[in-house]
Amino acid sequence: MLQLFDQPLQASAAFLALLSTVILCRRVLRVLLDYFTTDVCYVPKPTGAHWLWGHELEPSQRRPGEVYARWFDGHGSVVRISSAFKHDDILVVADPGILSHIFIKRPYAYPKSSLFRSMFLRLAGKGLIWAEGEDHKRMRSTLNGVFGPERLKDMYEDVKACSDRMTSALVNYVTSHGGDTVVQIPEWSTNVTLDVIGRVGFGHDFGCGETLEAKTLSKAWTEMVELNMSKAGKKAPIVLRAFPIINLLPIPALRAQGAINSIIRVLGERLFVKEEQDPKSVTGKDLLSTLSKLCSSNHDTTILKDELLDHVRRHMAGHETTAVTLSLMLLTLARNPAIQTKLRKELLEFPTEPTYDDFATKLPYLDAVIKEGIRMFPAGPSTERIAVEDDVVPLRQSIKTPGGKVLTSLRIRKGQIILVPTILINRDNAVWGDGWTFRPERWLESDGLPPPSETTQGWSQTLTFLQGPRMCIGHRLVILELKVLISSLIKTFVLHDTDAAIEHTFSVTLQTKPVGEEHVSLPLRLSLVQQ
C-alpha cells in the first residue's frame, strides 16, 4: 500500500528538483549574460530585500521619497534594487546625466513602462500622456498651440473667475460657521481645479463642484484613490508589473480607474456632439473648440473623433494633480505661519488687484512660494521608463566597481526598467542642502539654488513637470492656477493647522490621509483675515 503513495511522491520530488535546477541555471545564465553585456551588475544594491517583494514594496510603506533618500545617501545617485517575484533588477536613478539622456536626448527610446501606460490608458484613454514615438510627436504638435504662452493670457480671466467663485463660497461657509471653522481642503481644491479645466479646456461650467457630473466624477476619483491607498492597493502595481495579464481581470481598483475614464468620456461625447450640431459655436480658443475645428478640417493635422475624446479625457482627469499640489501647499503654509504672514503682507500691500502680467513678474515672494511648493509636492512622486534597445547611458557621478574600475557610463540592455523618484530628486539633500525643508527664500537668494550641473533641466531645476519633449504640456496653466488661487485664499483667510495626525502617501498621485486610516483627508482651520 505504501508503495502506491511513494510513486507520486517520488515523481513530485523529481519535478521539484528539475524545476529548481532550471531556475538555478536561468539565474547563472543571467549573471553570465549580465557580466558580458551590461554594467548593471556593478551598480550598488541595498540590502534587506524581501524574499517575495524584493525592494519594490518598501518605498510605499514609508513617507514618499524617504526610502529612496536612504538608498541614495548610502550608495550614490544610481542604485539597483531587487524586483518582486525574482524578476530582473530595476535601476533607480537620480543622476542628472542619465535623466538628461532618457528624457531629452533619447526620449522615444525610453517610453513609459507597461505598468504606467496601462494605468494611464485606464484613466484617460490613448491621449498625449499615453502616446509614444511618432504618435506623441504628432499629438504634441497639435496641442502646443492650445497651451502655448500666447494662449495663457486668454485663460487668465477664466482662472480668476473660478478662483473668485471658490473664495466667495468659502467665505460664505466660514461666515456661516462663526467666521472660524475647519474645512476639508481636498474637496475645495478639487472643485476649483475642475472648474478651471472645464472652462479653459472645454467652455464648460462644473458649478464649483455642485453639478451632478462634477459630484459623480469626484466620487469616482475618491473611491479609486482610496482603493489604491489600501494595503492590497499598494501591492497591486507590483503584481501588475510581474503579471501584466491581470490588467484584463475585473479587479475593483482597476475597475475604479476605468469608471473615471467612462464618466469623462460620456461628458466629452456630450460636449463634442453639442459643438458638432452647432458648428457656429466652435469659435472659442479652448481645447475642445480647437480640436473640433481640426477634427472637421482637411489639414494634415486632422485628428479623429476618438483621439479628440482621449485628449478631452486626459486633460479633464489632469485637474486632480493640480488639486493635490494646491492642498499640500495650503497645509504647509498653515504649518509655517511666518511664511504665510510674509506672503499675505506682499499680497495685501500690492497697490492694485494683480493682473496677468503682475502675477508673472511683480510678486516675487508669491513666485518663490509657488516654486517651492511645486518642488516639494510633485503630484506624481515617481515615473518609470523602459529601454527599447541596448544602450549606453552617461553618468555625471561615476561608479567604482569592486575591482577598482571607474565607470563614467553604464551599458544597459533592452527591457531594462528605470525608476525615476521625482519627489526625492526634487528634495535630495545632497543637491539642495535642506531639500526636505519648505523654504521659499532659496529662490530669492543669490546663491540659494544648486549649480545647474547638479540638477535636472526641468522647469526651475525640478523634475515635477519632467523635461524634454515629454514635459507636461499644461505646466504654464498649473503655475498660473496656483498663483491666482493661493493669492486669493491667503488674502482672504488665515490658515491654521488642526494638529491632526496626517501623513503623505502615494495612491495614483500624492495624497494625504489620517495616520492608520485609508481615506483621503486634510482638515484645515480657516478664519477670516481682519481688515
Image (cartoon, grey):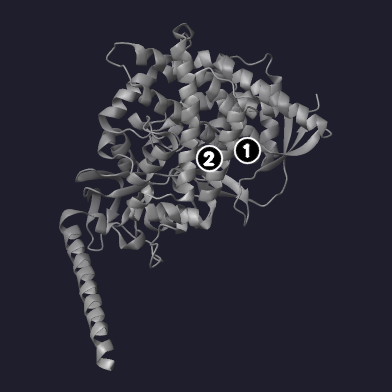
Q: Mark 1 to mark 2: distance in Å?
A: 14 Å
- Residue, disc 1: 186
Q: Residue furthest bottom?
A: 1
Quadrant position of residue 526: top right
Residue 498 visible here? yes
Quadrant position of residue 56: bottom left
- Residue shown at 21% from the left, 63% from the top: 31
Where, quadrant-wise, is the C terminus in this rendering? top right
Q: Which residue lies furthest to the right in this view?
A: 178
- Residue, disc 2: 377
Give the numbered dot on residue 275: none
Q: Which amino acid does label 1 sit on?
A: Pro
Badge 2: residue crowd in 10 Å (few <14, some 14–19, many ≥20): many
Depth check: 442 or 411 in front?
A: 411
- Residue shown at 30% from the left, 16% from the top: 301
Residue 530 in the image: state x and y as whole percent: 81, 27
Residue 166 in the image: state x and y as whole percent: 67, 26
Q: Do the residues bearing badges 1 and 2 touch, measured as CB atoms within 8 Å?
A: no
